[in-house]
Every structure is written in C-alpha cells, then in structure tokens.
Image (cartoon, helix red, strand yellow):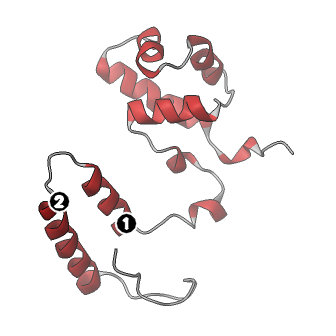
C-alpha cells in the first residue's frame, strides 16, 4: 500500500533548506556533496517531489531541520511529545557537557517544569503529570 504523501509539506521544507543554503553561501551542488544526496534528488524536491527516507534524513542532519515540524496532519501534530524530553535529548547530545553537568541541568529543568508547568487539561490522555525524564 502506497504511503499517503499528503502529510509532509515538502515545499516548506525546501524553502527552509534554501534559506539555510543561502545563509551558508553555498550552491545546491555543494549541498549535494555535503549531504551525499544526489543533485537530481534536490532538483526533484524543488519540483515538489518527496525525497526518500535516506535523503530526508541526510538533509535534516545537515540543516538541523526537523521533518516532523513540516507535518501538515493536525492529528499527527497533536501527538508531538512534550518539550522536556526533547530538551533532555539535546542535552545528552551536547558533547561539551559532562555527564554530571547533564544530570544537574536535567534535575533543574525537571524541577522547573514541575513547579511552573501547566496543569493537565481536558483532552490529555490520562490527566497525569509526565513521568520524570
């Protein structure tokens, strides 16, 4: 069964790629070289065609763009995870932080979320406070 391609806004993703490319002052050929994505794939994307998963992954890694931010289906977007786990993932990926530093920042952020976070509202899955990360 073919995937429904209506959930990813490839045009908007390409516009943001172009903004990043221009900011870096490089050509599309250089983007192709840096990302290992063929120039023909980049051309097809510019014509509204969706990239394959490998190409999308490489372009996302190079650009820092999150393809999930370009999902157009509101039901899928509503399932976006909370910000705290995203922050923790970024902290764990930061090579400049020691494990102790990551743990200390995690404890601070978790405490801040518990203190200042919004209370669960109608429409949440279980009404429970998110588990400690």
Between discs 1 and 2, the one toward the N terminus: 1
Residue 50 appears in which quarter of the rendering?
A: top right
What residue sits 31% from the left and 23% below the top? 23
Judge from the rendering whether residue 91 lies leftward or rightward of residue 15; answer left or right: left
What residue sits 43% from the left and 40% below the top? 65
Neighbor class of circle 2 (other Cα within 10 Å; few <14, some 14-19, many 20+) is few
Determine contact: label 1, label 2, CB under 8 Å.
Answer: no
Quadrant including the C terminus: bottom left
| 110 or 46: nearer the viewer | 110
What residue sits 64% from the left and 44% below the top? 8
CA distance separating discs 1 and 2: 17 Å
Quick check: 64 above or below 83? above
Residue 102 appears in which quarter of the rendering?
A: bottom left
Could you say where residue 62 lies in the image, as x and y percent from the top left?
A: 40, 30
**Element type at mark 1:** helix
Quick check: 90 above or below 122? above
| 94 or 124: nearer the viewer | 94
Judge from the rendering whether residue 96 lies leftward or rightward of residue 72; answer left or right: left
Quadrant including the N terminus: top right
Could you say where residue 59 lies in the image, as x and y percent from the top left?
A: 48, 30
Neighbor class of circle 1 (other Cα within 10 Å; few <14, some 14-19, many 20+) is some
Task: Determine which of the numbered discs, if any, sits on residue 85 in the image.
Answer: 1
Task: Determine which of the numbered discs, if any, sits on residue 99 in the image.
Answer: 2
Could you say where residue 66 lies in the image, as x and y percent from the top left?
A: 46, 45
Quick check: 99 above or below 131? above
Quick check: 41 above or below 60? above
């Amino acid at each position: 069964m073919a995937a429904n391609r209506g959930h990813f806004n490839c045009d908007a993703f390409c516009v943001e790629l172009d903004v990043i490319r221009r900011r870096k002052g490089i050509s599309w050929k250089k983007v192709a070289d840096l990302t290992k994505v063929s120039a023909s794939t980049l051309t097809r994307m510019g014509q509204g065609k969706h990239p394959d998963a490998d190409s999308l992954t490489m372009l996302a890694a190079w650009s820092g763009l999150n393809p999930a931010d370009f999902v157009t289906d509101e039901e899928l977007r509503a399932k976006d995870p909370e910000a705290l786990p995203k922050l923790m993932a970024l902290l764990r990926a930061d090579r400049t932080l020691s494990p102790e530093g990551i743990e200390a920042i995690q404890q601070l952020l978790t405490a801040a979320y518990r203190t200042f976070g919004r209370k669960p509202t109608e429409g949440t899955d279980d009404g429970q406070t998110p588990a400690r990360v």
